[in-house]
Amino acid sequence: MSGLSSLFDPAHWVRSSFSHGIHPEENKHFTANKPIRRLPFSPEMILPLSQHTGAPSVPLVHPGQEVVRGEPIAKAGGFVSVPLHAPATGKIKGIELMPTTKGPKTPSIILEVYPGDSQEVRYFQPRDVDTMSPREIVQAVQDSGLVGLGGAAFPTHVKLTPPKEHTVHTVLINGCECEPFLTTDHRVMLEYTEDLIRGTQIFMRALGANKAIIGTEDNKLDAVEAIRAKLPADGSIEVKAVKTKYPQGAEKMLAKALTNLEIPSGGFPSSVGLGVFNVSSTAEIGALLPMSQGVIERVVTVTGPGVDRPGNYLVALGTPLRFILDQLGFKGSAQHLIMGGPMMGGTVSSLDVPITKGAGGVLVLTEQDTHGRISDHAYPCISCGQCVDSCPMHLNPAQLGKMAYKHRYEEMAESFHLMDCFECGCCSYVCPSSIPLVQYFRIAKSSNREKAKAS
């Protein structure tokens, strides 16, 4: 038994998972076998100062200033914040309010790209990562501007700084990519394998962990094979495949499947000795830290029946969506575009919104694809229980939905564990009454946050 066939030997991988969840149509065939290719540079780039969880970045540049590719153009606005780096060599056009994926405009640096420049990275300094202390690694990670590239955009250096009472013994690298259509992480595991291993070792050193597990779903066995071929001989890192099911990539679900440890309600992975990171984030740090470089680009899956040339593209941060679609043969309108995947992504508010650090995919649908599949009307709950059976957090979405309809938001959080919902969309997906449960829960959470700030 050899090659991919050997991966079906139970000794090589596990088929563990979590309870509940769903099996939406994968639709990964559009791009799963498409190698990563670089997209051309847009003439103008839009760089929001807030494209991560936490305080916005603080500008270091002024209009008219020339910058080189890789140069810091904004500093971190606090501990839970990261800097920004110039994705291209050019001139700062201005700092203005620009549209975002969610709608409201936000302060952004506008970069006019020099068309005749080679666009080589000119701002870097080689260093020996192996001699760095854990504290130096954490600072270097923040200086790089790295955030979770799986979509959450939470500053990575904060995850590398767990509470002092928590000891991390195992690092989990999340390569499940269970969201339909998206294949960014799959291609990263196949093409940037050495960077992935190096990044895993860096995270292990920063946290003092002696073990790491790279986990992916069993619909990506070629990635398992590619990673296993590069694993260090000391056995400190292993790769495992788990059952293909949505939302297997959620950190609580992945922790349960790979280690049988349960992250407590309201707790962090570090409370059970785990550190969890996305594969793209891990590969990025493996490539950037040895050269003291910042995050200036990312791999993006542009896919769906509404684009002529779907694929996985290396895109400079700040590239407007309109430019990407012009390059790849867009047919449709903004109302058929989703930034991210169909389960947890959001419809874009404008074709002028840019690619940010957390944007791993652009799903391009057509009117034919959405017609009849997205209901404009929600019907009364029929108490079928499908949402309860699908919820990976074992909540009662039907009950929460009824309470949200009556604006009983605080009670939802206090007595019905609203904050345990991570908005995976399973409940909305299976609801035969087309009740927008996830949207209800987002409104409830937002209302509670606003009340907490006011009190």
Image (cartoon, rainbow, N blue to C red):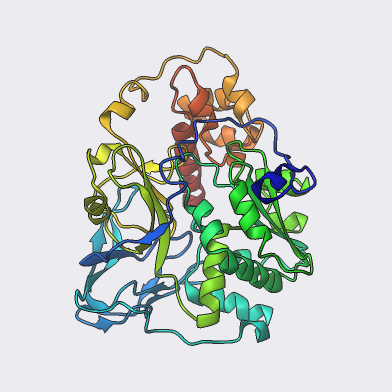
282 or 221, which is in the foreground? Answer: 221
* x, y percent for residue 408: 52, 30
193 or 180, which is in the foreground? Answer: 193
On screen, 365 above or below 201? above
201 or 437, which is in the foreground? Answer: 201
Among all residues in the image, which is located at the extreme front? 1
Q: Quadrant of residue 378?
A: top left
* x, y percent for residue 98: 25, 58
On screen, 175 above or below 138? above
Residue at horizontal 52 percent and vertical 12 percent from the top:
382
Q: Is residue 400 left or right of residue 321?
A: right
Q: Quadrant of residue 121?
A: bottom left
On screen, 217 above or below 380? below
* x, y percent for residue 100: 31, 53
Q: Is residue 414 visible?
A: yes
Among all residues in the image, which is located at the extreme top? 382
* x, y percent for residue 180: 48, 39
Q: Is residue 154 visible?
A: no
Residue at horizontal 28 percent and vertical 33 percent from the top:
366
On screen, 371 above or below 231? above
Residue at horizontal 45 percent and vertical 65 percent from the top:
55
**Exactly how many numbered labels are in the figure?**
0
Q: Is residue 375 left or right of residue 416?
A: left
